[in-house]
């Protein structure tokens, strides 16, 4: 899944749906996919994403010669 930004989110029947967007050839954002997961797992999923993205940022910073925070 390739995403450039996130759009609207909804909660319906215990399921969270968040729009995933990209910029199209017309220069406008278009919804291309959705992140979909049970609301009861939202906290855990966000914690996992935070951990993964923090580690990836450290790797990018180190590769660029910057000191990680």
Image (cartoon, rainbow, N blue to C red):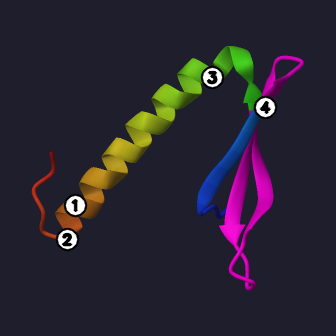
Q: Secondary structure at mark 2?
A: loop
Q: Are marks 4 and 3 in contact (CB under 8 Å)?
A: no
Of the residues tagged 4 and 1, which is closer to the observer?
Answer: 4
Q: Residues within 10 Å of mark 1 (few under 14, many from 20)?
A: some
Residue 30 picture location, percent across and down: 77, 66
Please say if 44 is above or below 34: above
Quadrant in the picture for the C terminus: top left
Q: Secondary structure at mark 4?
A: strand
Of the residues tagged 4 and 3, which is closer to the observer?
Answer: 4
Return the residue at label 1: 61
Q: CA distance from mark 3 to mark 2?
A: 32 Å
Q: Secondary structure at mark 1?
A: helix
Which residue is at the far bottom? 25
Q: Secondary structure at mark 3?
A: helix
Q: Which numbered disc flags the more N-terminal residue, 3 or 2? A: 3
Query: In the rendered structure, does residue 52 fall within the stretch colored magenta?
Result: no
Residue 58 picture location, percent across and down: 25, 52
Q: Which numbered disc flags the more N-terminal residue, 4 or 3? A: 4
Residue at (28, 62) in percent of width and height? 60
Return the residue at label 3: 42
Please say if 9 is above or below 11: below
Q: Which numbered disc flags the more N-terminal residue, 4 or 1? A: 4
Q: Disc number at residue 10?
A: 4
Residue at (22, 61) in percent of width and height? 61
Return the residue at label 2: 64
Q: Are marks 2 and 1 in contact (CB under 8 Å)?
A: yes
Residue 18 picture location, percent across and down: 72, 41
Q: Disc number at residue 2?
A: none
- Magenta residues span 10-36
């Amino acid at each position: 899944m390739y995403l450039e930004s996130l759009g609207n989110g909804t909660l319906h029947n215990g399921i969270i749906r968040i729009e995933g967007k990209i910029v199209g050839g017309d220069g406008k954002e278009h919804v291309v996919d959705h992140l979909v997961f049970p609301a009861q797992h939202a906290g855990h999923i966000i914690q996992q994403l935070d951990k993964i993205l923090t580690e990836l940022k450290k790797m990018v910073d180190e590769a660029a010669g910057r000191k990680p925070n």
